[in-house]
Amino acid sequence: MNMSKIEFGSDGIRGIAGEWPLTTFNLVQIGQALGQFMRSRSEHPVAVVGRDTRPSGVEFWPCLIAGLTSQGIHVVNLGVMTTPGVAFLTRRLEADLGVAVSASHSPVEYNGIKLVGPKGLRLQREDEIEIEKLIENVPVEIVDPAASQAQQTSAKNLIELYVEDHIERCPTESLNSLRVVLDCANGAATQVAPEAFRRLGTQVTVVNDALDGTRINYRCGSEHAREYPKELANIVRQHGADYGYAFDGDGDRLTVVDSTGRMYDGNDLLFVLATYYMTQKQLRGDTLVTTDLANSGLFNALSHMGIHVLLTGKGDKNIEAAMWGGDYMLGSEPIGNVIINDGYHTAADAVYAALVLSGILVRNRPISLAEMVAPLRKWPQKTVTLDLQASPALEKAVQEEARRWEAELGNGGRVLCWSATTEPGRFRIMVEGGFEKTQEQVSEVADAICKAIEETAGRLSVDAAVSRVTP
């Protein structure tokens, strides 16, 4: 058994299902530690728990809940539910903790645990440290999963609250003039997205809506649509739809595709939403929040509209902290994890963002989404992912290589490198050229950087393995 300390990453506790730190033993251990954490803060603690569709989640489910209930925690069991849905209902029920068992956009072999507090916001780092210590020291008891039934409330009916909320807050009362394809990534969005759109009168075609989770995120969903938009565009055309909305496995990321095959990412969504909220005088402080991975063209387009951009570290947690710290309305990364702080929602919610976008499109007919984003002239960008078993020396060499090529790119050019914290062993490189560069030139630079990294890895160590990841 791996006796290393279990720690939180940038997006909860993540790993390969069935391996440390995500064995059934670990899940009982984590559940008991979370129970102790909650009991130190509440006399009658309640946890709201949901999961995505992964088969490993079915196995982990009774272990985590048994650990919680062994500490006297009452569990509100949502079953399959999006991560933003868990956050919404935790806040709505004024529960003490929300727990989502999910690995979001990652492949089926991964799983994880995401936590939110009573206000539906991610836990502070000091809370995570306290939980880490509890996990390390908890005397794991033998618990009977069947005994936890008395301390659970099966609450699938609460999903209705989530759906009704989304319908109520759509910018239009009806979407009956809109035809859309919903790609649910064979994940948790299947439970809520089709129902919400249909109740608003949308003409809906649903694809990748299996609930067995064996093909979650596999050649489908938001990440696949961002890499291969024409596949979803073909389905959009086949069904005579206007747009295709692709969610990820736990429903926090959104990619949009139109019938021509054009893909709209988080930069485009931020631009359209910021424009809408600005005209409605709802964009508090005339400011939105994003990260330095956002396209530089977005900064220019927004500045011409009098909208300020607050940059923060990558990841939902950092965007969320900046938004609530400054009481800002809107935030997202380029991957499409849109957060709308309208007083009702706290998490990146792809289903809600898609409904709001749909309402905006209907309100502005016959103006298309392509016409709405026309003022946004994005600079050429290329992001590549490497399988990189790196040493500190290799990572230093990567950063040096990035700086050298950044100088080559000239005015406005950028090269950013970072470890993919939700997928250990993977490394990402983003290359952005100045406005005068072409996409082909930027792609050539990205390829050159990858080749240089491979050569450097070979020189430094025979154990350093670098390979390009096929999307």
Image (spheres, rainbow, N blue to C red):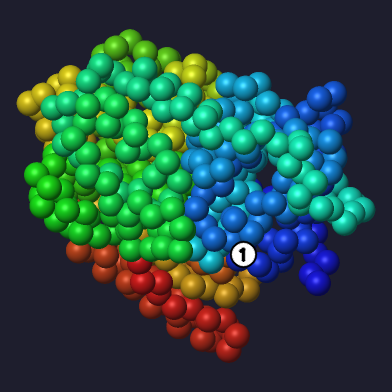
Report if residue 32 is visible in the image.
yes
Q: Quadrant of the N terminus?
A: bottom right
Q: Name above or below for residue 18 compared with residue 123.
A: below
| Residue furthest bottom in the image | 462
Residue that badge 1 annotates: 17
Q: Is residue 143 left or right of residue 313?
A: right
- x and y, in percent, of residue 115 in the image: 65, 40
Q: Nearer the viewer, residue 369 or 438?
A: 369
Judge whether residue 264 can be spotted in this image. no
Residue 130 higher or lower than 423, as above or below = above
The percent coordinates of residue 23 (x first, y second) are 71, 64
Nearest to the observer: residue 345 or residue 62: 62
Q: Is residue 391 above or below residue 302?
A: below
Image position of 223 (left or right of 70): left
Image location (x, y in percent) of residue 345: 49, 24
Taking the spot 89% from the left edge, 50% from the top edge, the residue there is: 138
Q: Amino acid at mark 1?
A: Ala
Relative height, residue 207 to residue 302 (above, below) = below
Residue in the image at 32% along x and 38% along y: 194
Give the residue at x 29% y 27%. Answer: 199
The number of callouts visible is 1
Residue drawn at point x = 35 percent, y = 22 percent = 167
Q: Quadrant of the C terminus?
A: bottom left
**Percent position (x, y) of residue 169?**
36, 18
As helix, strand or loop, the secondary structure at mark 1 comes to loop
336 sits left or right of 457 in the view: left
| Of the pair 154 and 43, the residue shown nearer to us | 154
